[in-house]
Image (spheres, helix red, strand yellow):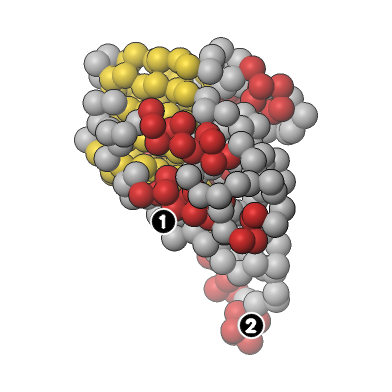
């Protein structure tokens, strides 16, 4: 089912190895700053039966440590569903290869949860492999001004996707990290994908707030907390997942003094 462009590029790696062997040892001992010797690779970990977190990585210029980004793979009787692509095309190809090799399934469809690169950097790879990518109309509109490909705008503020016995709910709780941020809920597995609306257990800042609505973000988080009180696993867009305490943690970060000074936020909930 997968087109040939999906094949992992084995030969360039072999060629890189051959090149490294032929280099003088003094050069290998101190590679020039910024040389990209370490390729970033996707990780996949299980969080519930048939539900996996895919984690991809991005290296910002001047920062030695790659930043991670989470999405979901949901295995159903009728194929796999993806929530968000990997951060870039290469790791999205690894994602498709993992689904094919480990689940022995094809990807039925993908949903991107807002128009930022970490959510949709691999849309073109999915579309090249004849996988439909869906989003809300607002995300599709915002994506049209970016360069990653445009999803099909078929997701309403509340949409249920059924695949076999699996039920996947998509819900727009209002603006927060981004004006178009969606969350995803798997009621049978009690997994809530908060995406970038929810901060990781290890997060100490709000991260990228270029498109954030800091006034409405706490409202959106409280809406999600009230709607999904049974969540057993909460997966953030970045960093470590946990339980519903991640929602409280996000509210704490939103009410931190450094954030308060930028906004008209009132007291804690
Ligand atoms: Zn984002």
Mark-to-mark CA distance, 1 and 2: 36 Å
Numbered-mark total = 2
From the viewer's side, name the closer residue of 179 and 193: 179
From the viewer's side, name the closer residue of 171 and 55: 171
Tell me if mark 1 has few (under 14), some (14-19) or many (20+) residues whose alpha carbon lies within 10 angstroms of its own.
many
Residue 205 percent location from the top left of the image: 57, 59
Q: Residue at x 71, y 27 (%)?
A: 142
Task: Kindly state the secondary structure of the residue where label 2 is placed.
Answer: loop
Q: Residue furthest front?
A: 267
Q: Residue at x 53, y 55 (%)?
A: 253
Q: Give the residue at mark 1.
A: 201
Seen in the picture, residue 255 relative to 72 is either above or below; the reply is: below
Residue 27 percent location from the top left of the image: 65, 81
Residue 134 percent location from the top left of the image: 54, 20
Asked whether the viewer can see residue 123, the reply is: no
Q: Residue at x 64, y 41 (%)?
A: 215
The numbered dot on residue 151 is none
Horizontal side, residue 128 vs residue 45: left or right: right
Tell me if mark 2 has few (under 14), some (14-19) or many (20+) residues whose alpha carbon lies within 10 angstroms of its own.
few
On whether ligand 1 comes within 8 Å of the CB at mark 1, the answer is no
Q: Of discs 1 and 2, which sits in the foreground?
A: 1
Q: Residue at x 35, y 31 (%)?
A: 228
From the viewer's side, name the closer residue of 140 and 18: 140
On whether ligand 1 comes within 8 Å of the CB at mark 2, the answer is no
Q: Residue furthest bottom?
A: 26
The numbered dot on residue 30 is 2
From the viewer's side, name the closer residue of 113 and 82: 113
Task: Kindly state the secondary structure of the residue where label 1 is placed.
Answer: loop
User: Quick check: marks 1 and 2 in contact, CB under 8 Å?
Assistant: no
Residue 200 percent location from the top left of the image: 45, 52
Mark 1 / mark 2, whichever is N-terminal: 2
Image quarter in which the N terminus is found: top left
């Amino acid at each position: 089912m997968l087109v040939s462009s999906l094949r992992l590029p084995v030969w360039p790696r072999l060629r890189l190895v051959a090149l490294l062997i032929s280099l003088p040892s003094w050069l290998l001992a101190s590679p020039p700053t910024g040389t990209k010797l370490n390729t970033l690779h996707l990780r996949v970990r299980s969080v519930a039966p048939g539900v996996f977190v895919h984690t991809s990585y991005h290296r910002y210029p001047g920062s030695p440590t790659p930043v991670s980004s989470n999405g979901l793979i949901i295995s159903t009787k009728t194929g796999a569903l993806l929530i968000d692509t990997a951060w870039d095309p290469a790791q999205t190809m690894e994602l498709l290869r993992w689904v094919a090799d480990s689940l022995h399934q094809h990807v039925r469809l993908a949903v991107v949860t807002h128009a930022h690169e970490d959510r949709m950097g691999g849309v073109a790879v999915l579309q090249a492999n004849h996988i439909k990518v869906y989003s809300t109309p607002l995300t599709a509109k915002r994506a049209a001004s970016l360069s990653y490909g445009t999803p099909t705008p078929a997701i309403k503020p509340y949409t249920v996707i059924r695949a076999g016995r699996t039920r996947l709910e998509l819900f727009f709780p209002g603006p927060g990290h981004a004006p178009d941020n969606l969350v995803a809920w798997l009621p049978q597995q009690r997994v809530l994908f908060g995406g970038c609306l929810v901060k990781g257990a290890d997060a100490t800042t709000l991260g990228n707030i270029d498109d954030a609505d800091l006034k409405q973000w706490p409202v959106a988080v409280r809406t999600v907390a009230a709607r999904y009180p049974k969540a057993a696993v909460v997966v953030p867009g970045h960093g470590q997942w946990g339980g519903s305490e991640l929602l409280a943690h996000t509210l704490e970060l939103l009410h931190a003094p450094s954030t308060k000074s930028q906004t008209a936020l009132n007291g804690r909930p």
